[in-house]
């Protein structure tokens, strides 16, 4: 399973299908903010990562220009990731609460983190065409995660992408399409789909998403997936 994910990851990182996103991710690397000046940037599409035997898959929007686009690992090296990994650690799905770079010791157990779009988009807003070009990567990734039972959508974009990925697998999804909301839960094919507000600074700094709110969704995911939870600490 991991070998197939590695092959897919290599294909993802070589992609240059969206000229606007290629230009944006490379410009971000060439013109970093002062706090990252002098650091090497990944500046390529970012594959998913985590436990190949995961029962829980988390789907975000896209790498951050100076987060995953810099580190090469989605949610690593930015404030959203700080919030997310601390929560994953609290429920036992991560061995540590922080992540700053690849090789920092972070391991996920029972969980896999990925994104709907693999390049950092301007203003965090990929176009519909960019979204659709990238979608097959998530479809294939989900198919390779054969033990997955729960999908956690980090935001409305991830919710819609997850539903499309399940539908692309040939599995039935609810009609009319269920609406995203924090704490929303639906059965989609063989998966339980859970929604949470995205752990962006816009949400966490304003209190729209609190640590307790995210913990509740993650605990429900562990229960639905039969994941080992706290035993993974």
Image (cartoon, rainbow, N blue to C red):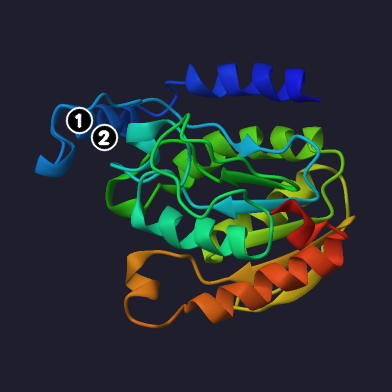
Q: Which residue is mark 1?
A: 27
CA gap between label 2 and label 1 equals 5 Å
Q: Residues within 10 Å of mark 2 (few under 14, many from 20)?
A: some
Q: Residues within 10 Å of mark 1 (few under 14, many from 20)?
A: few
Give left or right: position of 68 versus 179.
Answer: left
Visible residue check, residue 159? no
Visible residue check, residue 9? yes
Q: Position of residue 183 (x, y in %)?
A: 65, 79
Name the residue located 60 percent from the left edge and 23 percent from the top edge: 9
Q: Identify the secondary structure beneath mark 2.
A: helix
Give left or right: position of 199 versus 180.
Answer: left
Q: Position of residue 181 (x, y in %)?
A: 60, 78
- Residue 230 badge: none
Quarter containing the C terminus: bottom right
Q: Are marks 2 and 1 in contact (CB under 8 Å)?
A: yes
Name the residue located 57 percent from the left edge and 73 percent from the top edge: 214
Q: Position of residue 182 (x, y in %)?
A: 59, 78
Q: Which residue is mark 2?
A: 24
């Amino acid at each position: 399973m991991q070998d197939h994910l590695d092959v897919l990851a290599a294909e993802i990182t070589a992609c240059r299908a969206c000229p606007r996103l290629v230009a944006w991710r490379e410009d971000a690397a060439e013109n970093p903010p002062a706090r990252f000046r002098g650091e090497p940037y990944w500046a390529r599409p970012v594959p998913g990562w985590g436990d190949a035997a995961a029962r829980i898959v988390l789907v975000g929007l896209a790498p951050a220009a100076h987060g995953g686009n810099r580190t090469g690992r989605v949610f690593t090296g930015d404030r959203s990731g700080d919030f997310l990994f601390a929560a994953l650690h609290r429920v036992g799905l991560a061995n540590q609460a922080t992540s700053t770079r690849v090789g920092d010791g972070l391991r996920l157990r029972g969980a896999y983190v990925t994104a709907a779009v693999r390049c950092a988009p301007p203003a965090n807003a990929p176009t519909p065409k960019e979204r659709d070009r990238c979608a097959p990567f998530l479809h294939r990734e989900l198919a390779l995660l054969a033990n997955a039972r729960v999908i956690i959508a980090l935001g409305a974009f991830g919710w819609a992408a997850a539903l499309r990925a399940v539908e692309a697998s040939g599995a039935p999804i609810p009609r009319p399409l269920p609406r995203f909301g924090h704490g929303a839960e639906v059965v989609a094919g063989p998966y339980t789909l859970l929604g949470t507000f995205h752990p962006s600074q816009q949400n966490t700094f304003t209190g729209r998403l609190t640590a307790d709110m995210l913990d509740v969704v993650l605990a429900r995911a562990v229960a639905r997936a039969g994941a080992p939870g706290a035993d993974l600490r």
